[in-house]
Image (cartoon, rainbow, N blue to C red):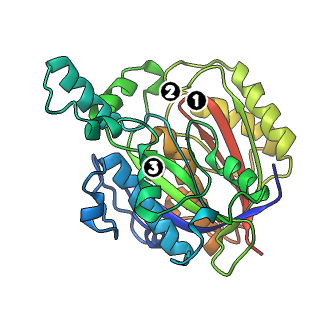
Amino acid sequence: MVRSVYIDGIGIISRCAKSAEDLAEIVGGNKVNFESGKIGFECSISPSKLRRCSRYSKLAAAAADGARSDADIPEDMDKYRIGTIFSTGYGASENNIEFSDSVVSGDPQKCSPTIFSGTVPNSCVGQVCILNGYKGVSTLLMGGDPLEYSALLLDNKRADVILTGSVEEYSEELFDSVMSYEAAQGCEISEGTAIMALRLEKSGRSYCEVSGTASFSLPFYPYVHKLDDKCIGMIYDTVNRSFSVPPDVVFTSENGTYFDYIERRALEMVFGSNTLYAAPKKLFGETLGSGYMLSIALACAVLKQGKLPDILGIKENIGSILVTGIDTVGNYCCVLLKTAR
């Protein structure tokens, strides 16, 4: 891990929060309202500019715009110094299914370059750059930790601000397919997108400090292939090597599946059973490739207020949170967040 960086802005679209303000209200104790299926959302970017965007790209554009606004990134900032580093597990799944169906049915009207361009996973980051004129470092990861990669780019002076996060859209066919696996039984799948503005230096808007990261690869994606107890040692080794001091709270990957036991057992071996463990997926659901970044967004809001939302437990004066996450290729990621001081 490189030197510390700071999260200055949050953009989020989820079943329970669609802005940084919504997250703050949830943490503050307001009633949580849940939305099912495709989540309705608004974007301040004009509809005329979004007309060629797929819903997948619109999710990214709206969340990125929310992060930009929350971080108060100046409109006249050098666009070559603004980076965009996103990740996804399944990409533009709805456009892919639509395009595939049109090919199979032989309908040439839907096999257009516009539709096809919306099927590629990096279409979301491309549209965000086009819509905003961003020309800095930019890529889309199929799995992995976009926060860690963004911190490395900032440390190497490749950008002054990086918008980083994950995008996953609702797809009934995809969700049904995942839920057909025994390993996924017990979770509730939902869509979600979270993008954050990252800076190297602390500002008056900083939510928290990113003080350390760690990751390793599990043998398989745990919601498709059922893993055995050998993975307890793998998680223990990585977490214990990187984060031996217990944080105030651990935000786990728990989602109601068999894997909850594996992760909790490993974490308790490191931090003990008296450490508070909280499961953000009680709020967001299992959002597949974006769960890690959604949990980080919630952790930012918690550290800003110094307390947990009631749905996750009772604890005050929170100054540090370890967030864990699993991506769709089996990477297990961790980040330690601390109150910006």
Residues 268 and 298: in front is 298
* Residue ID for mark 3: 126
Name the residue: 49% across, 55% down: 194
- Left or right: residue 198 versus residue 37 is right
Residues 51 and 163: in front is 51
Asked if labels 2 and 1 touch by Cβ distance under 8 angstroms, the answer is yes
Rendering coords of residue 242 (x, y %): 83, 44
Residues 148 and 284: in front is 148
Q: CA distance from mark 1 to mark 2?
A: 8 Å
Q: What label does residue 183 carry, if any?
A: none
Q: Is residue 216 visible?
A: yes
Q: Is residue 275 visible?
A: no
Looking at the image, which residue sits at the far bottom? 204
Type of amino acid at the residue the image marks with label 3: Gly
Rendering coords of residue 256 (x, y %): 49, 36
For the residue labelled by badge 3, is the local secondary structure a helix, a strand or a loop? helix
- Left or right: residue 175 versus residue 75 is left
Label 2 vs 3, first from the N-terminus: 3
Asked if labels 3 and 2 touch by Cβ distance under 8 angstroms, the answer is no
Q: What label does residue 223 carry, if any?
A: 2
Name the residue: 76% across, 60% down: 157
